[in-house]
Image (tube, grey):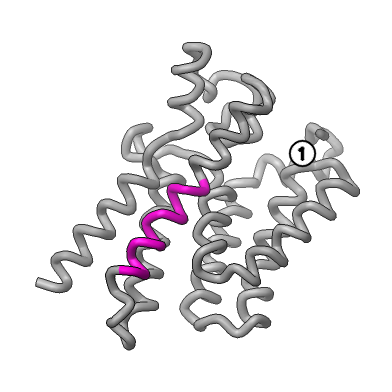
Amino acid sequence: MQWFSITLFVLAAYLLGSLPSGYLIGRWVADIDVRTVGSQNIGATNVARSLGLKWGLLVLIMDMAKGALPVTVALSLWSNEAERASLIVALVALAAFFGHLASLFLRFRGGKGVATAFGIALVLMPKAALAALVIFLVVTLLWRYISLGSLTALLTLPLWTAATGYHSLYVGLSSIFAICIVIRHKQNIRNLLQGKERKL
């Protein structure tokens, strides 16, 4: 029965992660499909550039919440499961993250995962998340590329997670985030190398 309830919660986390915040805001605010404008991504950056900063910030908060909320609830529900709590929470986190990457509501397509991963990290490894945030801000302000800041921050997140003493499962979790986010930023990486990436 316990594993049945865990499975249901993991599925619920995936469904929550699947909610395409940027797509929904685009339809609601301007009746546009953000996948057809700008960078054609459903994330906060493309929404901000296409619809305005306030809507981009709203999508950022919503995408972070999709990651933060289910892991917060999971921590509360299974806090007494000393041996299994970290594994259960990691599974919930992965479900929410992959829900964003492969949304059930967008034919298993989705965003790049940066905001959702950061929302999860803020709950599970806040010290590492804040260190990664500092890296993001410094790199973005110096070079004025949001994609470069995001990539650098997420690539260093596993290092910060290990250095600040969090559970090894969370180090693995942050490593999965980093790998997936690099894959999702392939075109951005090409653009950066070719000098074509859009600046702030």
Foreground pick, 19 / 36: 19
Residue 101 drawn at (x, y percent) = 46, 46
Residue at 61%, 31% in the rendered image: 56
Which quarter of the figure is the C terminus placed in? top right
Tell me: 78 left or right of 160: left
Q: Is residue 107 above or below residue 26?
A: below
Q: Relative to the observer, which residue lies in front, 172 or 117?
A: 117
- Main SS class of the magenta portion in the image: helix
- The outermost residue toward the bottom is 83
Q: Residue at x 33, y 51 (%)?
A: 14
Q: Amino acid at mark 1?
A: Asn
Residue 38 locus on image (x, y percent)? 65, 23
Span shown in magenta: 64-76
SS assignment at label 1: helix
Q: Quadrant of residue 20?
A: top left
Q: Which residue has dot 1 on it?
A: 191
Residue at left 64%, top 27%? 54
Q: On the rendered structure, is 47 left or right of 111?
A: right
